[in-house]
Image: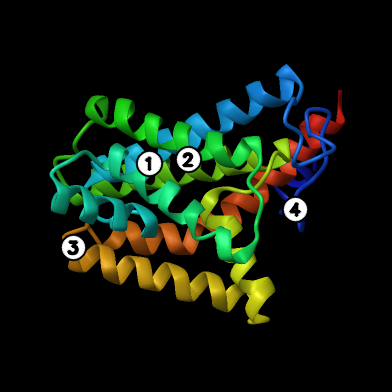
Amino acid sequence: MVIRSFLKPAKEVPTTWWSSTNPMDTRPRISTLTILCIGLWIFGTGDAILIAAGIGNTPWTVLAEGIAKMMGGSIGQATLLVSFAVLFLWIPLKERPGVGTILNAILIAAAIEYMLPVMPTPDGTFQAVIQVLIGVVLVGIGSGIYLTANLGPGPRDGWMTGIQRISGVPIGSVRAGIEISVVIIGWLLGGTVGLGTLLFAILIGPIVAVSLNVAGRVGAEH
């Protein structure tokens, strides 16, 4: 019964003892910053595991990999470049980044940059699928942790919500349109699209929802 209660998906981002009361707080508590950074590093590590599996990346990493191949840089460097490029797209939408927004751009890219070289490369499809599943779970857990810090959305999420606010198009349609577009562009540039991309698309929503629920319950206990 207790396990079932923890695994019940959350319907919204919960408030925890470490959550900031103001997303635009420029001087958040150390505990909030620490948990935010842990969540972002776990997210980036999960992304690195997915990349190393070699059977398909997350939509935005497909784009980053394509840009990296085009420019001759690393995927981590391209991820940072994409994040800050997206932040510039916030300007006409009049969105405001928070501390978490900037750290999101920096730490996820750093985790990919430093963790990817030490990740194993699977020998077969079965091992690759297992590695993808581990990566997706870590991305979901990292998302659940950093979202509860409430220090501003990530660059891509803020862009998505800004477009939705300006256009009035349903958020699901905006998200789908953006992610399909970046996958296509990334694939055309040489990014890896495959079974891993599909598994991520199917599983990430439920895993983030469960992670938020667990974080909310753990955070409420303190």
Q: Nearer the viewer, residue 72 or 94?
A: 94
Counting residues from the start of the chain, the first of labels 3 and 4 encountered is: 4
Residue of label 3:
189
Q: Give the CA distance from mark 3 to mark 4.
A: 37 Å
Q: Answer yes or no: do the residues labelled 3 and 2 have beta carbons within 8 Å?
A: no
Q: Is residue 3 visible?
A: no
Identify the residue at horizontal 35%, vertical 45% (top origin): 81
74 vs 208: above or below:
above
Q: Give the CA distance from mark 3 to mark 1.
A: 17 Å
Q: Answer yes or no: do the residues labelled 1 and 2 have beta carbons within 8 Å?
A: yes
Q: Answer yes or no: do the residues labelled 1 and 4 have beta carbons within 8 Å?
A: no
Q: Nearer the viewer, residue 73 or 94?
A: 94
Disc 3 versus disc 4: nearer the observer: 3
Q: Give the CA distance from mark 4 to mark 2.
A: 25 Å
Identify the residue at horizontal 57%, vertical 48% (top origin): 154
99 vs 206: above or below:
above
**In which quarter of the view is residue 63 placed?**
bottom left
Q: How many marks?
A: 4
Amino acid type, mark 1: Leu
Q: Nearer the viewer, residue 194 or 162?
A: 162
Residue of label 1:
80
Q: For the residue labelled by badge 2, is the local secondary structure a helix, a strand or a loop?
A: helix
Residue of label 2:
105
How crowded is the residue under tag 1: few (<14 C-alpha within 10 Å), some, or many (20+)?
Answer: many
Q: Answer yes or no: do the residues labelled 4 and 2 have beta carbons within 8 Å?
A: no
Counting residues from the start of the chain, the first of labels 3 and 2 encountered is: 2
Counting residues from the start of the chain, the first of labels 1 and 2 encountered is: 1
Residue of label 4:
10
How crowded is the residue under tag 3: few (<14 C-alpha within 10 Å), some, or many (20+)?
Answer: some
